[in-house]
Amino acid sequence: MYGPGPTDPQLSAVASFLARPVSRRRFTGIAIGAAAAGATVSWAGPSSYARADGPNLLTNPSFDEVTGSTPTGWTVVSGAVSSVTDPVHTTGGRAVRLDDPDPEGGVLLRSAPAPVEAGLLYEASVWVLPVSGKADLYLEFWDAAGVRIAVQFTTSSGTSWQQLKQPGLSPEGAVTASVLCYQSVRNEGVAVFDDAALVESTGGEIETFPLLAPGHPRLYFTADEVPRLKARAADTSPLLSGGSGAELWAAIEQQATTHLTETSFTVGYVGGVSITYQLPPVMPEPHDPPPGYNGAYPYWTAMGSGIRSRLEAMSLAWVVTGDQRYAVRLKEYLLALAEWPTWSDPAFNRRAYLDTAHLVTGIAFAYDVVCDEFTAEERARVVAAIDANGMVECWSANLALPTCGGAGGDTPGWVKW
Ligand SMILES: [Ca+2]
Ligand SMILES: [Ca+2]
């Protein structure tokens, strides 16, 4: 429950840090984790969006310096790459052309690594002319061992000059970032890239909303409201929506009771595909797309919905009945889900989507009602997962949504929706 009210004095330092309008934003696990765990909640305000204010961190960003036939400082990882003087995005210089005639191979041109700091927001951008086919811009983060630990991308549309932009949050352990001009394996076409950039971005201002109810539960109801929920579960008077509180509760309790002993649930998908998911939830193995379906299939959406409905039914059952079996089961679910490295299907190259929304919604409700049943160490594990897999990824994905207003627009679509 968020709104104006007194700030928790124990976390006023965090709140003050997040509320202070500084140009460089460090989105630490502590800050956002504190929000997830129930401290002062902070979030980018509705008028906030990524702003690319910093200096360009790339070497030879406009491809104007050439060694041999390719841009100096850039690495041709695969495919045909050549420096060109026509067309260029800016007059008087050079651009770089990628030729991708191969439906079974990609063309990759990677910038030199640029030093970055973990926990800061960056934005990659490039102007591209997709003469034919599609062109991609990737933003990659690397750790000290040279392992790529995060990647996000955006794809061109149409066949005129356009600026591709890809924001990304530098993850824990990141020491460098690179920009990748890319034509995908399945693509066939020609694209000219020019005027690339990698800059630190401010990410916009952050607003802070002190909690109205400092304890748990508080997400959908507070502890003061629990007696009323229990009374409603026994109330047989008719509701305007049909049925009664007692009838609704009976159906929920029946489901919740079933969930106590389930070891799996099965989802039927298109094309006769059926997948069984283990309970407590285990991250599923990759699954081939349904017959005739081209590309990755969003299996995780229905899976996430199934896990969410179980968490919600058992959370309410725990609150109404106080039956310890529900708390035990909810803890098993949350600790299992906290072990997942991601709450978004790895088959898709994205950080958060519908599956993440289902999982985070169910997990947040369950955590809100059973957090007092955890040890401090368990609680920290769950909060860290909500932070890393949920809040940071959803926030970052929001910033990465397509921009409105064509090539000149720099406001993520969600701001205008
Ligand atoms: Ca140029
Ligand atoms: Ca290709």
Image: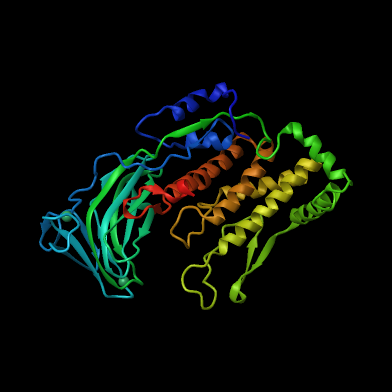
Most distant residue in the bottom direction: 292
Vertical comparison of 256 with 56: above or below: below
x%, y% of residue 350?
A: 45, 56
- The residue at 76%/43% (across/down) is 318
Q: Quadrant of ligand 1?
A: bottom left
Asked if residue 133 lies left or right of residue 320, the reply is left
- The residue at 64%/49% (across/down) is 362
How many marks can you see? 0
Vertical comparison of 391 with 405: above or below: above
Most distant residue in the front direction: 405
Asked whether the viewer can see residue 373, the reply is yes
x%, y% of residue 301?
A: 58, 60
Q: Nearer the viewer, residue 148 or 169?
A: 169
x%, y% of residue 63?
A: 17, 55
Question: Where, quadrant-wise, is the N terminus in this rendering?
Answer: top right
Q: Nearer the viewer, residue 276 or 134?
A: 134
- The residue at 56%/64% (across/down) is 299
Asked if residue 129 lies left or right of residue 201, the reply is left
User: Residue 66's quadrant in the figure?
Assistant: bottom left
Asked whether the viewer can see residue 63, the reply is no
- The residue at 56%/28% (across/down) is 210
Asked if residue 77 lies left or right of residue 256, the reply is left
Q: Nearer the viewer, residue 253 or 275?
A: 253
User: Residue 302's quadrant in the figure?
Assistant: bottom right
Most distant residue in the right direction: 236
x%, y% of residue 412?
A: 42, 49
Q: How is the image coloured?
A: rainbow
